[in-house]
Every structure is written in C-alpha cells, then in structure tokens.
C-alpha cells in the first residue's frame, strides 16, 4: 500500500509543481507585454462586439430575402408569359380524342387553284 500511496503522492506532487511552473511562466509572459499592448487589450475589452453577430444575421437574412423574391418573381412571370402560348396549348391538347386522330391520319394535298401552268423552256 505504501508504494501505491507514494506513487499517487508523487503524481500529485508532480502535477502541483508543473501547474505552479506553468502559472508562473504565463504570469511572467503576460507581465512582459508592452504598455501599448496593454492599452490595446484594455480598449478591446471595453468595446462590445456582441451585436456584430446579430448585424451579420440580419444582413444575410435581408440578402437572402431579396434573392428569393427575385427568383419567385422570375418564375411567376415566366409561368404567366407561357400560359397562353399556342405551342403550350397545342401540347396540352387531348391527343386521345377521336377527331384529332382522324384528322392526323388523313392525308391531303393543298393546291393553289389560281396558279397558271408554265409553258416555257425547261418545263416538263
């Protein structure tokens, strides 16, 4: 038991001594700062940067709102623009109805009855 208590005692002593050395080193290091650094640190400590995060959140939110509004208005204008487009009406038509199928299955020739025959050189 003495060996375990002495080892734990040694560990505690080592921990205390290292903590003391590190604290002394950090205090000495802080003390070695120049007066200008101390003034700067004091000034920064006085300034309040807590509201900077809220400012950034509000600005990013406003920007996001504007971008979304532009996108939505563009999509709506495109939808309204093509609502009466003949091509889209043609696509929307009912292709399974009988009159459409019969009209597309019949072949016919469009002629110009007022055209004259050509009786010149090179005619067939």
Image: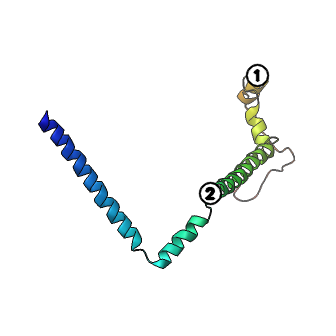
Q: For this rendering, which residue is in front, 119 or 56?
A: 56
Which residue is the site of mark 1? 97
For marks 2 and 1 on the same chain, the one whose residue lies earlier in the sequence: 2
**Which quadrant of the view contains residue 20?**
bottom left
User: Can I make out residue 8 in this image?
Assistant: yes
Split into 4 quadrants, where in the image is the N terminus? top left
Contact between labelled residues 1 and 2, with CB atoms less than 8 Å apart = no
**Which quadrant of the view contains residue 119?**
bottom right
**Secondary structure beneath label 1:** loop
Find the distance from the CA under tag 2 to the CA under tag 1. 69 Å
**Secondary structure beneath label 2:** helix
Name which residue lies at 21% across and 46% down: 11
- The image position of residue 101, as x and y in percent, is 73, 25
- Numbered mark located on residue 50 in the image: 2
Label 1 packing within 10 angstroms: few (<14), some (14-19), many (20+): few
Q: For this rendering, which residue is in front, 90 or 36?
A: 36
Label 2 packing within 10 angstroms: few (<14), some (14-19), many (20+): few
């Amino acid at each position: 038991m003495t060996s375990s208590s002495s080892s734990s005692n040694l560990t505690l002593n080592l921990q205390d001594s290292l903590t003391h050395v590190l604290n002394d080193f950090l205090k000495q290091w802080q003390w070695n700062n120049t007066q200008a650094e101390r003034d700067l640190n004091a000034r920064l400590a006085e300034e309040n940067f807590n509201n900077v995060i809220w400012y950034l959140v509000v600005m990013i939110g406003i920007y996001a709102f504007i971008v979304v509004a532009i996108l939505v208005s563009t999509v709506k204008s495109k939808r309204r623009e093509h609502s009466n487009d003949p091509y889209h009406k043609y696509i929307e038509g009912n292709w399974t109805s009988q009159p459409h199928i019969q009209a597309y299955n019949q072949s016919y020739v469009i002629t110009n009855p007022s055209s004259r025959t050509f009786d010149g050189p090179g005619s067939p």
